[in-house]
Image (tube, grey):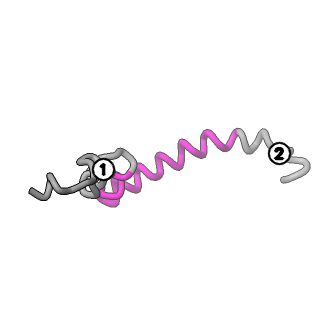
């Protein structure tokens, strides 16, 4: 009966939104055990560093900004 009276569409109800968020790939990381979460976080940091480090080196002259 409450399903019929609720004006909010089923896919936009808070519990369904939470379930969708919980199943998303990035949010799911927070539910993993600490060792697995730390490994994944370190991997993410390493990949970001590998991408941004060459850009940073190419952006500044070592003579001007050591």
Residue wearing tag 2: 60
| Picture coordinates of residue 36, whole percent (x, y) | 34, 53
Of 14 and 47, nearer the camera is 14
| Picture coordinates of residue 48, whole percent (x, y) | 57, 44
| Picture coordinates of residue 45, whole percent (x, y) | 53, 49
Farthest-out residue, left: 1
Which element is circle 1 on? Answer: helix
Q: Earlier in the sequence, mark 1 or mark 2?
A: 1
Q: Residue at x 34, y 46 (%)?
A: 24
Of 61 and 17, nearer the camera is 17
- Which class describes the residues within 10 Å of circle 2: few (<14), some (14-19), or many (20+)? few
> In the rendered structure, which segment of residues is drawn in magenta?
27-54
Residue wearing tag 1: 12
- Which class describes the residues within 10 Å of circle 1: few (<14), some (14-19), or many (20+)? few
Of 62 and 55, nearer the camera is 55
Query: Is residue 49 on the magenta stretch?
Result: yes
Q: Is residue 60 shown left or right of residue 1?
A: right
On-image quarter of the N terminus: bottom left
Magenta: main secondary structure equals helix
Q: Residue at x 71, y 40 (%)?
A: 55
Q: Is residue 56 shown left or right of residue 8?
A: right
Residue 54 is labelled as none
Q: Nearer the viewer, mark 1 or mark 2?
A: 1
Which element is circle 2 on? Answer: loop
Whole-angstrom CA distance, mark 1 to mark 2, is 48 Å
Q: Residue at x 45, y 52 (%)?
A: 41
């Amino acid at each position: 009966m409450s399903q019929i009276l609720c004006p909010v569409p089923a896919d936009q109800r808070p519990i369904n939104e939470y379930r969708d968020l919980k199943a998303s790939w990035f949010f799911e990381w927070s539910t993993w055990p600490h060792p697995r979460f730390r490994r994944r976080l370190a991997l993410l940091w390493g990949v970001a560093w590998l991408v941004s480090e060459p850009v940073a080196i190419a952006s500044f002259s070592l003579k001007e900004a050591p």
